[in-house]
Amino acid sequence: MMMALYSVNLRILGRPNLQVLRENSILSILPDTSGYEGAFFGFLLYGFLIIVVSVLSYVFLDSKSGLILRIAGANPKLAILNGISKHRLILGLGLANLFIALSGSLIAQRSYNADIHMGMGQVIVAIAALFIGMILFRKLSASHLIFASIAGSIIYMVLMQLALDIGIQAQDFRLISTLIVLLSILVALKSTKGTVLRKGADIFGID
């Protein structure tokens, strides 16, 4: 999907890199976008968006349709035996891509720049955040999964910032990301004899 969207995004942008400095964005509603005040207002705005998306996600996942989608994604064989169509997975992929598009658009508006390569390597970030979150929240309820993804993402970014503060060079971030993933998997293996790792693998659909 990422490889296919590379060409789609390139056609939409018209070029590998596009500046959006003078365009209206979601940040245009803020009273100030510069300095510490701008960072604070931006934090409040993005925090509010995270809460809204999280609540809507919980409402959907906790509904009948959401439960069917979770069953189809976690155990397709069981879903088929219970008369659930595999086409439910298409809905899940669509929602996932919706969240990815929303996140990408918010990042582009925040940085005033859209780059064709800005999403590269985010799969590693997602895996690391998921396993870190699964270590903290070991239940598989809808609310715990949402909190796990958010908490894991925050912890991952804090770890990356700490790596930057101690003098790690930017070109080494991919290596650091991989080490964080391996460390989170190692901790998951040691946690309740791999139960957390098994849960994370089930979410990814890994046999």
Image: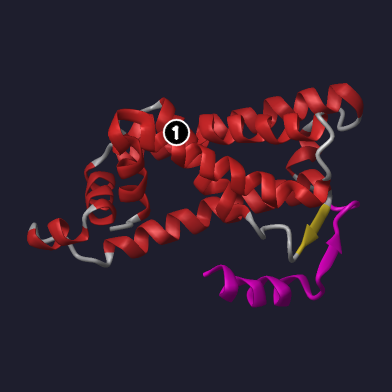
Residue at position x 34%, y 36% in the image: 196
Q: Position of residue 104 (x, y in %)?
A: 66, 53
Q: Is residue 31 visible?
A: no
Q: Position of residue 129 (x, y in %)?
A: 53, 39
Q: Position of residue 152 (x, y in %)?
A: 52, 33
User: Which residue is label 1 attached to?
Assistant: 187
Left or right? Give the position of 40 relative to 123: right
31 is higher (above) or lower (below) than 119: above
Judging depth in this view, the residue of 32 and 7 nearest the camera is 7
Judging depth in this view, the residue of 93 and 32 nearest the camera is 93
137 is higher (above) or lower (below) than 27: above
Left or right? Give the position of 101 relative to 69: right
Residue range of the region highlighted in magenta in the rendering: 1-23
What amino acid type should be assigned to the residue bearing mark 1? Answer: Val
Q: Position of residue 108 (x, y in %)?
A: 75, 51
Instruction: Tell me which corner region of the image, top left, top right, bottom left or bottom right, holds residue 45.
Output: top right
Disc 1 is placed on an element classified as: helix
Residue at position x 70%, y 36% in the image: 160
Left or right? Give the position of 195 relative to 39: left
Judging depth in this view, the residue of 38 and 3 nearest the camera is 3
Give the image's coloring scheme.
secondary structure
Residue at position x 49%, y 34% in the image: 132
Q: Quadrant of the C terminus?
A: bottom left
